[in-house]
Amino acid sequence: MIHIQIPATSANMGPGFDSIGIAVQLYNHIWVEEQTTGLTIEVKRQQAIPVPTDETNLIYQTMKYFYDQKGLKMPGIHIIQEDYIPMVRGLGSSAACIVGGLFAANELAGGICDRDELAQIAAQLEGHPDNSNPAIFGSMVVGALNEKEMKHVRLELPEDLIFAIMVPDFPVSTAKARAVLPDAYSRADMVFNASRAALLIGSMMAGKYENFDMAMEDRVHQPYRAALIPGMDEIFAHAKDFGAAASYLSGAGSTLMAMVTKDKAEEFERKMSAYLQTLEHNWELTLLKPDMEGVKIDRE
């Protein structure tokens, strides 16, 4: 049986809408093997949103897409799914299913594609590469996609950077989060975001933490989605007061993310936990190290 471990991802980093994401040490697990006929799906860990156990399951659909695209006959499939990435919370749960499905199908098919080829397929399926890239390559990945291909660059994250995920008890669907965005932006807003995205990448490479607060500023998605996340701006303000280098909306939400250096992590966790307990929606705080490897495969 093939075991696949896929990390959670945090995309849309500040000004990096649909382009910049990171992987963190929170994982979904998939076990896959061929069976004589049909489809069997076991879900070992249920969440609030039920995971389909028929052919509408995203892992299975992705595997079938891979076989169809490669002109291969789909065998009978047995899938065991164990999810720890919260669903519909902006932490890449859908991308984890797509990446897991692609790597599972590729492994069963004899490893006919390398990691870069699978990243191309994942980006096309997702429609943007900011979740699938870090899920595959780990660390922080900057990517761009056109009609034909995806280009990416993997960056090494500073060793002393911790990501604090703040997850409330309510979801925000990607469709709803996209619906609140405007159809057009001003030139000033585009210059604003382009300069911040460049500053974010350069500062991350140089370890210039003092730049992160400005580098995470955004005029493309976060201001419009703030209404979907009660208390978002106030949580960001408190995160800064408690020592975070910067904060941002993870993916489409509802998770909020703060970046904290190791020397400030203990104080941040203590103060932010106490503050979140005063809010509605049962916010859960977890401090995670970045995942530096991306998706992992082994046979059991």
Image: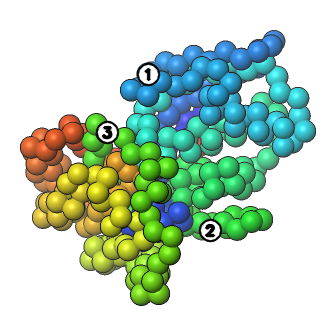
Mark 2 lies on residue: 144
**Which amino acid, by three-letter code, is at mark 1?**
Gln
Q: Nearer the viewer, mark 1 or mark 3?
A: 3
Q: Earlier in the sequence, mark 1 or mark 3?
A: 1
Q: CA distance from mark 3 to mark 2?
A: 30 Å
Residues packed near mark 2 inside 10 Å, few (<14), some (14 to 19) or many (20 plus) = some
Q: CA distance from mark 1 to mark 2?
A: 34 Å
Q: Is residue 32 above or below residue 220?
A: above
Question: Could you tell me if the residues under marks 1 and 3 are in contact, i.e. CB atoms within 8 Å?
Answer: no
* Residue shown at 71% from the left, 17% from the top: 39
As drawn, the label of residue 99 is none
In the rendering, at what x and y percent does residue 262 appear?
25, 57
Residue 250 image point, x, y percent:
39, 55
Q: Decide which of tag 3 and tag 2 comes sooner along the chain.
A: 2
User: Could you say where residue 24 lies in the image, as x and y percent from the top left?
Assistant: 42, 48
Q: Picture coordinates of residue 125 (x, y %)?
A: 67, 49
Query: On the image, numbered disc 1 is attached to which residue?
Result: 46
Residue at disc 1, secondary structure? loop
